[in-house]
Image: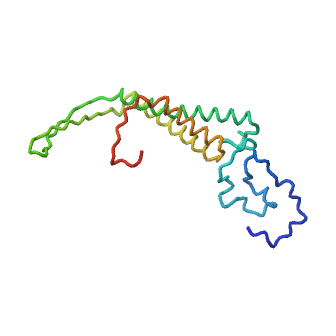
Amino acid sequence: MDHSGMNHSGMDHSAHHHPPTSAPPIGGNGDHGDHGGGEVGGHGGMVMTFYFGYTNVELLFTGLLINSPGEMVGACIGVFLLAVLYEGLKMGRETLLRRSQVNVRYNSMPLPGTDGTILMETHKTVGQRMISPAHFLQTLLHIVQVVVSYILMLVFMTYNAYLCIAVAAGAGMGYFLFSWRKAVVVDITEHCH
């Protein structure tokens, strides 16, 4: 909004100073009065830049407000542990899936070799029953995994750098702790990992 034609000489601007540790203002109240719209930068009131702050940081719910360094440390520890749990849940689901596999079949198919010989290629086919306790458990754990992943995404979308670092560090630590045994097979044709 162009404020060049407005006379702001009679307005008290002392309330517009925000300490560097607070979240950037997200409402219309901090911008020369409320001229309507209630949006900052056209983003519906959301902070869209990363910042290091520990006061006035809203975390997931309206009433969950961080206002001190101790509260921020506690929130970061909780977010870190949630991200570790998420990685552990992913690996746990893979382990359960491998244990519950049934109907293992090996299929061999002849392939012509480059020198005219016939080579045999063997494929392992694995199946799982839809109506089984293992599949119900996998479904329940999938729901939990999706909910936790969206919570972590919303925490990251606060754009608070401390919380974003906690998400990334927790995911890294979870991968380090839980994925070291995972056999990695890379499909060079797969581009979305």
Which residue is farthest front? Answer: 115
Q: Is residue 23 left or right of residue 92?
A: right
Instruction: Name the foreground residue: 36 vs 51.
Output: 51
Q: Is residue 29 left or right of residue 125?
A: right
Residue at image position (69%, 55%) is 45
Residue closest to the eye, 168 or 101 = 168
**Splitting the image into 4 quarters, where does residue 184 fall?**
top left
Left or right, residue 145 beside residue 110: right
In depth, the one of 95 and 24 nearer the eye is 24
Q: How many badges with numbers are in the image? A: 0
Q: Position of residue 142 (x, y in %)?
A: 46, 36
Above or below for 121 versus 192: above
**Residue at x 15%, y 37% (from the top left corner):** 120
Residue 93, percent across and down? 43, 31
Quadrant into which the N terminus falls: bottom right
Q: Position of residue 167 (x, y in %)?
A: 58, 39
Q: Quadrant of residue 2?
A: bottom right
Q: Residue furthest left?
A: 116
Identity of the residue drawn at 33% across and 43% down? 187
Residue situated furthest bottom in the rendering: 5
The quarter of the displayed image where residue 64 is located: top right
In the orientation shown, which residue stands out farthest toward the right?
Answer: 10
Structure colour scheme: rainbow
Q: Position of residue 178 (x, y in %)?
A: 47, 29
The quarter of the picture where the C terminus appears is top left
